[in-house]
Image (cartoon, rainbow, N blue to C red):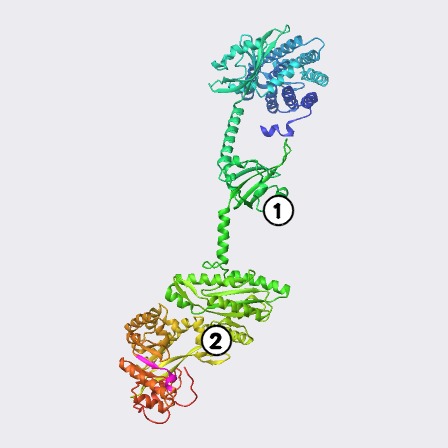
Amino acid sequence: MLVAVFDPASYSWNFFALPLLVTAAAMFLVGAMVMVRERGSREAWQFAFLAATICIWLSCFSLMYVAKDARVALAWAKSAYLGITFIPTALYQFTVIVTRSPRARLAWAGWAASALFFAVAASSGALLRDLYHYWWGYYPHFRWLGAPFLAFFFAMLALSLRELWLDHRRAAPGSVHAVRTRLLLAGFVIAYLGSCDYVAAYGLPLYPFGYLPVFVFIVVVAQTIRRHHLVDLTPAFAAEQILATVADPVIVCDRDGRIRFVNDAAASVFGYAAGELAGAPIELLAAPSAGMADRLRAAAAAEPVREEEMVFRTRDGELVDVGLSLSPLLDERRAAVGAVLIARDVRARKRAEAALRESEERYRTLFERNQAGVFRTSIAGAILDCNDSFARILGFAARADCIGKSMLHHYKDLWQRTALLQKMRAQGGLADEEVGLVRIDGAPAWVLANAMLREPKGDGIEVLEGTVIDITQRKNAERQIVHQAYHDALTGLPNRMLFYDRLTQALSLARRDERGLAVLFLDLDQFKLVNDTLGHAAGDRLLVEIARRLQNSVRDSDTVARVGGDEFTLLLRNIDDGADAARAAQKVLEAVARPAEIDGQRLYLTTSIGISTYPADGEEAEALLTNADIAMYRAKELGRSRYQLCTPAMNAKSVARLTLERDLRLAVERGELALLYQPQVRIASGRTVGVEALLRWNHPERGLVRPAEFIGVAEETRLILPIGEWVLRTACEQARAWHRDGRSDLRVAVNLSALQFQQRSLVAVVQEILDDTGVDPDWLVLEITESAAMHDAELTVEVLAMLRAMGLRIAIDDFGTGHASLSYLRQFPIDTLKIDRGFVSDLETSREGSAIVNAIIGLAHGLDLEVVAEGVETEGQLRFLAERGCEEYQGFLISQALSAVEVPEFVERLPRGRAAAAGGRGIAGGGAPAGR
């Protein structure tokens, strides 16, 4: 069916459809014109709906006329009743709105009836089941529901005419309202003539000319609206519109307190439907305690009430606070006939007031109890208001003592206040700005300020408002931290970092002013002895006293710093030659040399001073410090308690030492170190019983470097520790290799440096190496020098005992060159004494030398120790040693130091049983001494 309805072949030209389409278009245009002219008023919307229903009727009937098929025509006929069934109700609704009729409820019944008739017409044949086919085209055929529909249709038309007639009678004669109503009444009467179209619906072939009265109606309505509008702006209309738009409830009561009128706002606020309050007593809304009857009587007596707070009730019993304004209604004789009540809902205002009071209380609490200082000052600096915290920051007991005072007296620097004001004007405020203040007692204070400028108001005063947090303790802590970072904790003197910074700045000034300066490097002589004998506490007090003396020995512009345990540096500005620096150094020497009373004891101390000057000894801070340090060590070498100026030779020596230290570090990394082995021979049997491992350095440029040239540097830089561990591990690995090859009677002796021997981990390191290499402890001899053993005799006894418990053999090397105590020597768990080569070399040329060697051998035998002589180079030396009972020897007489590969060959070539006193040179003898 839908396909046929939208198929052009289902339609043919019919002239009688044209007038209906023209009328429908005119009706549409008039509806649009009313919407525009009346600016979308309620009357305009209702007229537009009426025009739409008429357009639907006329448009659908025109399509019904041109339809060729009865089914298509029937579809359009039923569609037309979407408009026809609603025309009478739309017309009545429009009339009620235009005339302001109070019978608007009848329109709701009309809308319900119209909807019912349309539903029945669309879904059944009770109203329209088939069509007549007249000479002008198809036309609806009414069934049994046609009569009730027509009764409803004409009844709504009659009610509309009645409303217009009553409104016309109420209008003032000759008024615009009267003219407009009369024209609308005439137009509606003419339009009703179109009802003759229903005659054809009952089988009478009377041409339906109803579109003509409708067209005339359109012309009349258009003319009426053009000249008189639909809405008449009378005082009554304006009052009605005002009441409808007023947001506050408006109630009109008569003299008896009966409600005659309420606006929409009143119904909404108090929870009633529109019209539900009409005729109800005012006590329905007013709470019993409100005394509304008395107030109404007062209003009737022409005593208006203005904004009196009362309590009303809603329909649900909820209490509503209202601000009541009550005015009398007067008739033409000025007699009170009722009253108008405006009950403004003040609940929101009261909530806002309560919130404001709570906010003010919170603000006051926050203001008064805030730990941060809160303030208001004038731009001139007068304190207008503040809390107690702010007053306490400035040193006042309470805010009352602070208000009225001037802030200008409390700025650490007034220029900072000026700068802060400029910043606030430029940026609108301050955020976390650190400001220095002064308390009333003169003590400094620091605050973190957040503030802003307020524009002048009625009093014309620009106000500064903000908060401050007391950060004095934090600033003091920061200052203390900075001081500790750049100062010595014990003496309070600048430390190395601050001295270096000041030296760098002084050099910049010296370059600019073309002046000189001097750096003095001091090291206290024998200060360790004070710590060891009197304790570190006494040593600290002595350092404090020395620091005080040094500060008193120089000018205020000079700098004294502590850069080490017993090391100090001095920066002397504007020193143009070394003589001035020397005089200052001599003054320092004299100050330090004065006796010092520490813990009731008089102590005498000296110092060694190195001096470097700018620009002679360097142009950078590092160079001046280094050269002064070198000169200081030279002063110590020359006998201490003196000063030494830096010289070019010292610089060259320093550069050489630094180069050697750098190359030595690389040597450890690159594996440039190697071991040679000096054979040790039993004098009685002539048999090789062991070797001593000797360290050598194969320098890529300098060739073979002897230990005497680099061991001292290794000990100073502590490189001796990894080097010594490497020597011990390598020697043990080599011993293990020889024993696997059948040389089980060959011992290996390894020298331990003094620094190695002082390490608490020495025993554990030795045990780890023995475990890793698998060497029998009896194959290893550890040698320590006499001076190393006596450095801490008690520790030496403890460590040697543990090493001996592991099965190792212990030898004292270079015996006779140190200061060994015979009592300690007796306690040391050792096996061998080794006579220093210096004594052996004097055997044939010095009676004293032979006496010393003889005494050492006798001492060793008396303690049940074996003796090994070092550096034996002649047969006469060997003969002397054999006669005195020396057990073993080593030296160039028998062999130079050998590589690991050469040792087994040497052992094989050495004749066994060679007599100790045999003449001639050794097998591998000859050549210059190579030393150890």
Residue furthest out toward the bottom: 919
Q: Residue at label 1?
A: 415
Q: Is residue 275 magenta?
A: no
Magenta stretch bounds: 832-840
Q: Nearer the viewer, residue 849 or 62?
A: 849
Question: Residue 75 appears in which quarter of the rendering?
Answer: top right
Q: Nearer the viewer, residue 425 or 591?
A: 591
In the picture, the disc for residue 638 is 2
The three-letter amino acid code for the residue at tag 2 is: Leu
Sooner in the amino-acid sequence: mark 2 or mark 1: 1
Q: Position of residue 128 (x, y in %)?
A: 57, 18
Is 291 rendered above or below residue 564? above
The three-letter amino acid code for the residue at tag 1 is: Trp
Say which of marks 2 and 1 sits in front.
Answer: 2
Inter-mark Cα distance, 2 to 1? 58 Å
Q: SS class of the residue under badge 1?
A: helix
Question: Residue 15 appears in which quarter of the rendering?
Answer: top right
Q: Position of residue 83 (x, y in %)?
A: 61, 20
Q: Is residue 535 left or right of residue 621?
A: left
